Structure formats: structure tokens, C-alpha cells
Image (spheres, coloured by chain):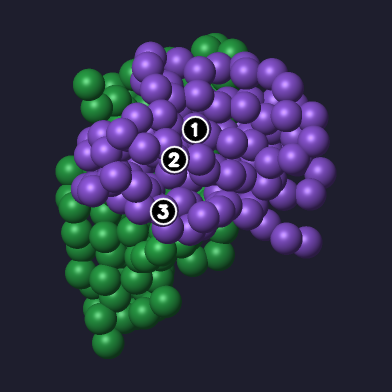
Chain colours: A green, B purple
Amino acid sequence: DQQVKQNSPSLSVQEGRISILNCDYTNSMFDYFLWYKKYPAEGPTFLISISSIKDKNEDGRFTVFLNKSAKHLSLHIVPSQPGDSAVYFCAASAHDTGTASKLTFGTGTRLQVTL
Amino acid sequence: NAGVMQNPRHLVRRRGQEARLRCSPMKGHSHVYWYRQLPEEGLKFMVYLQKENIIDESGMPKERFSAEFPKEGPSILRIQQVVRGDSAAYFCASSPLRVNTGELFFGEGSRLTVL
């Protein structure tokens, strides 16, 4: 039962353009959403997050949008840079479980930013 | 400030042997989490520990797997009688307290290969 889904396994974007990574979830108990970035042979690193009480959070080139009614979130990277090439994982947590740090991850989207 | 340290980075075991993976959290962090990433999948929660306590082990397989975080020393994930299906990347993460938002600091992972 995949509660967090990233339906695009890969995405290729030209340098300078916008990258849009999508994520869908099924568990309505999720109330906090995060994006992690992962390079090969390294651990995931936290990128940006959003609480369910918001619909947008911005941090520099990265913006996360949340549509609760559609149970959908997206990560926008603009402008995209070659160093952004990595695997991006969407993750979610539910405070009511009592263990909010028990993250549920999607399967990841491999972003390649081309010159 | 050193990050989360995991060792070994790579471990090869034959079926039936034992695997021990170690994790030293970031300085000042007393909460440790173990996640497993099978090939082509996202990270899956295994266990959440504080010093000398297992808080949530709902993601741990019922048999052969155990985890501890002693008062002194690193956290250890132990897999007894390994099978080929245990081949995966095992990531440890830490946080300074019971994280309410799920922002965890991950190590670089230990890659277990079972022959």
C-alpha cells in the first residue's frame, strides 16, 4: 500500500528552466510534508517542507505547493541548475500517530538538469 | 560538527551470516531512526530509538532484525541469518529531540549485499 506516490520516475529539464516534481498521497492523516534530495552513494538531505495549514512555502529557488483537497503536492525549482541533478523524495508524516518523525517516503523522481 | 556517521559503508555477507550496522548520531542528538531502501524503492521506516529505549519498532521485520541504542556507544542494527532479500541500503537518521516535523539528518548509509 503506497501511501506516498511519485508517479514520474525521472524528469529531464534544461538548465535555467523550471523543474516541477509531483507527489500524491492517500493518507488524510498526513499533516506535514517534506522534500529530500539524494545524490548517489549519499544519504538524503532535507530540502524544504510544508505544514498542512499552508498551501505554499518558498525558500530561494525552491517552492513547495500543497493542494489538500487533491492530496497533491509539488516541488518547483526555478531556475534549474546542473547541481540540482539528483533523486528527489517526497515524504509525509502524521502528528497524530505520536511518532511524527516516522516518515513515509515516495519512490523518488530522478531529476536531470541538462546544459 | 560531524554529521551522522554510519559504518561500515559497505558490507558483504553470505546467507546465514550476521550483519551489524552501526550509527553514531550527530553531536547533541539523542534520537535515532533506521530506514531501509530496497532497490528501486523509497526509504521505509524500520525503528525509532532513544538512548536505551525502543520507541517505535513497527517497521521492523518480526524475525532476525533487532536494534539497540545503548547509553554509551553507537546505535546498532543487527540482522541475523541474513537472506538475499536483506540486500539493501540501510540509512540511519538522528534528531535532537522528538521531532514534530520530521526533519531528520541522515547518514550516508550502509549498503548490505548478501551473496
Left or right of A9? Residue A75 is: right
Task: Please rate how many residues cluster around mark 1, counting C-alpha atoms within 10 Å: few if below 14, some from 14 to 19, many from 20.
Answer: some
Q: Are marks 1 and 2 in contact (CB under 8 Å)?
A: yes
Disc 2 target residue: B19
Counting residues from the N terminus, which is met first, the one under dot 1 or under dot 2? 2
- On screen, residue A17 above or below B32: below
- Which is more N-terminal, label 1 or label 3? 3
Chain-order first, disc 3 or disc 2 = 3
Image quadrant occupied by the C terminus of chain A: bottom left
Depth order, front residue of B54/A59 = B54
Labels 3 and 2 share a subunit: yes
Label pair 3/2, CB-CB below 8 angstroms: yes
Q: In this image, B28 relative to B104: left or right?
A: right
Q: Nearer the viewer, residue A34 or B48?
A: B48
Q: Residues within 10 Å of mark 3 (few under 14, many from 20)?
A: some
User: In the image, residue A52 lies at what x, y percent?
Assistant: 50, 28
Residue lying at 25% horizontally and 81% vertically, measured from the top left: A114
Q: Which residue is mark 3?
A: B11
Residue with the mark numbered 1: B78
Where does the image place residue B48, in percent across and percent down from the top left? 58, 26
Q: Chain of mark 3?
A: B
Kind of residue at disc 2: Ala
| Mark 3, secondary structure of its residue | strand
Question: For the residues tagged 3 and 1, is the chain the same?
Answer: yes
The CA distance from mark 1 to mark 2 is 6 Å
The answer for which chain carries disc 1 is B
Q: Position of residue A72 (x, y in %)?
A: 31, 35
Determine whether A87 is above or below B98 in the image.
below
Residue at 78% from the left image edge and 61% from the top image edge: B1
Tell me the residue at 52%/55% (across/down): B8
Q: CA distance from mark 3 to mark 2?
A: 8 Å
Left or right for B77, reference B54: left
